[in-house]
Image (cartoon, grey):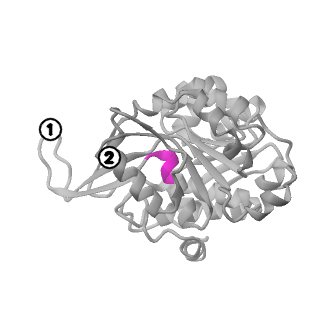
Amino acid sequence: MHPPESGGALASVKNESKTGEERMSEQKRARVVGVGAANVDVHGRSRKSIVMRDSNPGYMATSVGGVTRNILENLARQGVPVALLSAVGDDLYGEKIVRDSKLAGIDMSRLLQKQGAVSSSYIAILDEKGDMLLGMSDMRIIEDLPTAYLDENAGLLKSADAIVCDACLPIDLLDHLVSEAANGTSVLIDPVSTAYARQMEPIAGKFYAMKPNVMELSILSGLPTETETEIERACEALLTRGVRRIAVSRGEKGCYYADAEGNRLFRSLRPVLQMVNATGAGDAFLAGFTHALVDGLPVEEMLDYALASGITAIQSMTTINPDMSDARVKENITRYRL
């Protein structure tokens, strides 16, 4: 459900009065709560042109990932207090997810651990330029999250300035989150892929904001998105359905933004000449977008912060750049602004 609009700040959109006790605990409060995937990522980048159906020499890197968890880690590294609602198994991957996420600054105290279950994992194969050729995931554990789990954490969700989630969650859980469990807190979603976008399409209009890429936008709107004019029309269709803010990621072309307040603009920074790894750019973009939104930045500054967060991400071999920070993002805004 969407609270009424009020300027650019998402925090002010909630329009909730805080008690003295709540104000005293403000420093510990999670400003952004994530609901979604947490997994171990394995990335392989070829040293030379990929030869299909053969073994290719390359570089391998393992890190903790998951779309929502990645968004939260980027936010935490930018200085935003965050908490994660997700599930892991009682296996080595689950232990790594919890340990590394805590070290990154994510509150994992509400995490659901399932005995005998297999934790989520994801593998990405990159070409010699860093572009992804293939990705494969095992997200079965997150597909079984019960709606009661969200109800048990209703207080955490209600107290946040914003909730971020991903479409890897089953549609009944997403619907429950946005319709009931969020209890007035604005929900932002990453569609993740065309397959997951197709799954969430029936309830797309219930989300406050979303960050699709061009292909996901086409699925969600039911319209072609090959030209800039078509992208604009597709966003209008989603705004008509109830979405309040849409930021369409367009790779090196930047993004297109549209909202219910009448803002419409294409925005970009200068292209990065040396890209190390493109897989974390979308997660970092949505993290930067969310950070700027809850801080109430004007639209142009909000989009620059989101784009610069994405640039910061692709300057590292791992999905999350260990050098991600508010200061680094602002440096990239200055360096790459047109």
- Decide if residue 12 is on the left or right side of residue 310: right
> Closer to the camera, 69 or 43?
69
**How dense is the environment of label 1, judged by Cα within 10 Å: few (below 14), some, or many (20 and up)?**
few
Give the magenta part as a residue range: 66-70
Give residue 68's mark: none
Q: Please state, as top left, top right, bottom left or bottom right, where the C terminus lies in the image.
A: bottom right
Residue shown at the point (52%, 46%) measured from the top left: 68
Question: In the rendered structure, which amino acid carries the disc numbered 2?
Answer: Tyr
Q: Residue furthest left?
A: 54
Give above or below for 165 relative to 323.
above
Give above or below for 290 relative to 258.
below
Question: In the rendered structure, which amino acid carries the disc numbered 1?
Answer: Arg
Pinpoint residue 318: horizontal percent, then vertical percent: 36, 60
Disc 2 target residue:
93
- Decide if residue 43 is on the left or right side of residue 155: left
Query: Secondary structure under badge 1?
Result: loop
Front of the two marks 2 and 1:
2
Q: Please state, as top left, top right, bottom left or bottom right, where the N terminus lies in the image.
A: top right
- Kindly tell me whether residue 132 is visible in this rendering: no
Disc 1 target residue:
53
Pinpoint residue 145: horizontal percent, then vertical percent: 51, 30
* CA distance separating discs 2 and 1: 28 Å
Pinpoint residue 333: horizontal percent, then vertical percent: 60, 71
Query: Secondary structure under badge 2?
Result: helix
Is residue 82 covered in magenta? no
Give above or below for 138 relative to 305.
above
Q: Which SS does the magenta portion mostly show?
A: helix
Q: Picture quarter containing residue 115?
A: top left
Residue shown at the point (38%, 65%) measured from the top left: 316
**How dense is the environment of label 2, judged by Cα within 10 Å: few (below 14), some, or many (20 and up)?**
some
Circles 2 and 1 in contact, beta carbons < 8 Å: no
Pinpoint residue 206: horizontal percent, then vertical percent: 71, 31
